[in-house]
Image: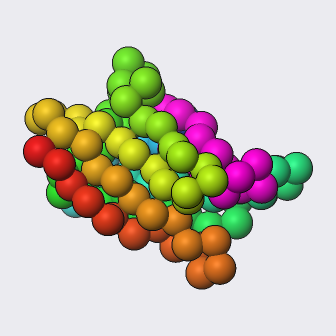
Amino acid sequence: MSTPTTIAIAFINGSEEFLRIGHSHYRRDGSSATYAALFEAGNPWPQAYLDLGTDPFPSVNNYSRNLSIDSAPEANLLVTGHAFEGGITVYRYDPEERTLTKEWVGR
């Protein structure tokens, strides 16, 4: 679950945890994975990999889209634009469970 491509970095839990948001290139079966690697500040190792989903495909398909990704760290929110159509997706991070849940999709 590693990727050579980092599109954006966003704090997700105050200044304690951050996400390295990347794009995994196409798999052998032709599909593509989108995820964010969760890190603790000061620790170089990923703590979890959080799936961003592909419906709709988040704006992690190239570097020019990095400004369409942002977070509200105190609220544990991540927001991404959509890669191929207008709109945004809002995800909520649960720091206890270390999960990311798609909360709202605006098209």
Q: Magenta part of the protein: which range?
A: 7-21
Q: Is residue 26 above or below residue 6?
A: below
Q: Residue furthest right?
A: 42
Q: Is residue 6 above or below residue 40?
A: above
Where on the picture, by quarter, is residue 47? bottom right
Residue 17 percent location from the top left of the image: 71, 55
Residue 37 percent location from the top left of the image: 58, 55
Residue 45 percent location from the top left of the image: 77, 57
Could you say which is closer to the camera, residue 79 or residue 47?
Answer: 79
Q: How is the image coloured?
A: rainbow
The answer to whether residue 20 shows anywhere in this view is no
The residue drawn where x is 29% and y is 37% is 81
| Quarter the C terminus occupies | top left
Horizontal arrangement in the rendering, residue 40 relative to residue 95 (left or right): right
Residue 58 within the magenta-colored segment of the rendering: no
Q: Is residue 85 above or below residue 90?
A: above
The residue drawn where x is 71% and y is 52% is 14
The residue drawn where x is 55% and y is 57% is 75
